[in-house]
Structures are given as structure tokens and as C-alpha cells.
Image (cartoon, helix red, strand yellow):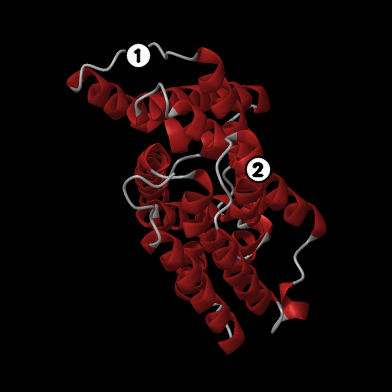
Amino acid sequence: MLGATIAFTAMQAAVKLLRDDGFATSEIIFYRSAPALPFLWWGLRRRKIPLRPARVGVIALRSAFGIASMATNFFAVRALTLVQHTVLFLLQPVFVALLAPLALREPLRAVTLAALALALSGAALVIHPDAAAFAPPLLPALLSASSALFSAFAHLSVRVAAASEPAERVVFHFTLHASLAGLAWGLAEGAPHDLELADLPALVGLVGFGTLGQVLMTRAYHREQAARVAMIAYAGIPASVALDAWLWRAPAGVGALAGAGLMVVAGALLQRARPQPGQP
């Protein structure tokens, strides 16, 4: 999941670059999804995995929640710094940790609670030292939080699907549904943004990092408890701090860096604390 977190953070940077350049949310959903479809289809064929899902309803729910999360996410990121968006979106692991015992009957382990306390302390340090500068616009902030909630439900759906669906099939159907949704939405909006050569690096990053993160995340939920997997996403904070400083010349303060360090420790704690064979 650590690899998925880094890939998704790089994808968010590509999304922000494209949104700053005037791309619509619908276009980014389409470009994020459609180019990967042939490669995902080829992977299913190569491994002789049937396209038809065993549990159509679960796959449909995963796609619906995922598309709602992408739409609110991509709309909000234009008005926020990358670290603002990441901090708000990282309500998602909290939602997963709190919902997993109810939705999946997974135990809420002491190590998860300890990591949660570390992560929330780190988030407070990221926000507090520059609270006035942080204060994000209300609507984008609410959309980021909504994206986190939709994403939590999508991740829980992935965990449910793991009992009957190969990771590659889950990713293929989500990518297909998102491509169709982005295309329909874009056609309804009218003329698309003109593609220029300068947009190519961000588009390649959007597709490549987005698909890589999706595959790694889905595999992680096939192998590990939902709350533990989701909490590792806090490693996205230091990655977003670095990208803000590099791409938008917005360096973080000492307190923010200390908070990012706490979040990395929380992720590492969960990564190392895997249950031993025979444990639930």
C-alpha cells in the first residue's frame, strides 16, 4: 500500500497541473481511466481471467463510490494546495478504520488505534503551525472531505470484492465504468479542452501513476485488513509536501515537516505490525 500511496500522490500532482491548465473534471476522469483499458484487458486475457464478475452488485458499488470520489477529488484539488488536499483527504483512513469493524466484522486492533492517534497528531501539526495560511476555501474543503468518505466506501467495497474477485478484474471494471462516466459527462458539457504537447507529461503521469496506484491498492486490500491498509495512506503527506515545494514553490514549515514525520511513523507501524500466521 505504501507504493500505491506514493503513486496516488504523484497522480494528484498531475491532476492539479491539468486543472490549473483548464482541464474539466470530466476530462480528467476520462483521461485518468480510458488509456489504461487496453492494457488491463490484455492483462486479464494473458492470465485467463474471465471479464464477467462473480458479484456484479459489489463491483457496481465499488465503481459508483470510486467515481464519486474521483469527481469530488478532482474538482476540489484545483482550489487547494496539494498538502491541504492531502490532509483533508486523509480523513479517509479514519473513516475506513471506524467503518471496517461494522461493515467487514474486522477487529479494531490496538496497533490500529495507536497508529490512528499518531496520524491525527501529525495532521494537527501539519495544519496548526500555519493555521491562517492553511484555512482552505469552504466548498473545496467540504468536497475533499466528501471525496474521503466516498473513497472509504470504495475501499471497503474492494475488501468485500476480494473474497470472490481477482484484483485485476476489479480494477478493469472500475476503469471501464469511470471511462464511460467521464465520456458521458464530458459530451454533455460540450467542447473539450484543446490538447497541447506541453500537457503530455502530466497526462502520462495521470494515467501511469493512477493505474499503478489502483492495482497496488486493490492487491493490498486482497492481502490485508482494511483499516491497516488505509492507514498507510498517511505516507502521502510527506510526498505532497515535497511536491508542493518542487512544483508550486510552496515549502512547508518545521511543524508541518514534524507532523509529516509522525504520519510516516504511523504508516510504518501498521506496515510492520502484520498479524502472524494463525492470528485473525
Q: Residue 231 at what x, y percent from top left?
A: 52, 57
User: In the image, what residue occupies the spot 34% across and 26% down?
Assistant: 166
| Position of 134 relative to 170 (above/below) | below
Of labels 1 and 2, earlier in sequence is: 1
Q: Nearer the viewer, residue 224 or 237?
A: 224
In three-dimensional space, the C-alpha distance between marks 1 and 2, rounded to whole angstroms, equals 30 Å
Residue 95 seen in the figure: yes
Q: Which residue is mark 2?
A: 99
Q: Residue 10 at what x, y percent from top left?
A: 43, 57
Q: Where is residue 269, by image quadrant? A: bottom left
Rate crowding at label 2 as few (under 14), some (14 to 19) or many (20 or more) other CA atoms within 10 Å: some
**Residue lying farthest front?**
278
* Residue type at numbered disc 1: Leu
Indicate left or right for 201 with 131 as reference. left
Rate crowding at label 1 as few (under 14), some (14 to 19) or many (20 or more) other CA atoms within 10 Å: some
User: In the image, what residue occupies the spot 72% across and 80% down?
Assistant: 128
Q: Callout 1: helix, strand or loop?
A: loop
Q: Nearer the viewer, residue 125 or 16?
A: 125
Q: Which residue is mark 1?
A: 51
Q: Residue 197 at what x, y percent from top left?
A: 37, 48
Indicate left or right for 204 with 24 as reference. left
* Residue type at numbered disc 2: Leu
| Position of 58 relative to 131 (above/below) | above
Residue 193 seen in the figure: no
User: In the image, what residue occupies the spot 36% across and 41% down?
Assistant: 223
**Residue lying farthest right?**
138
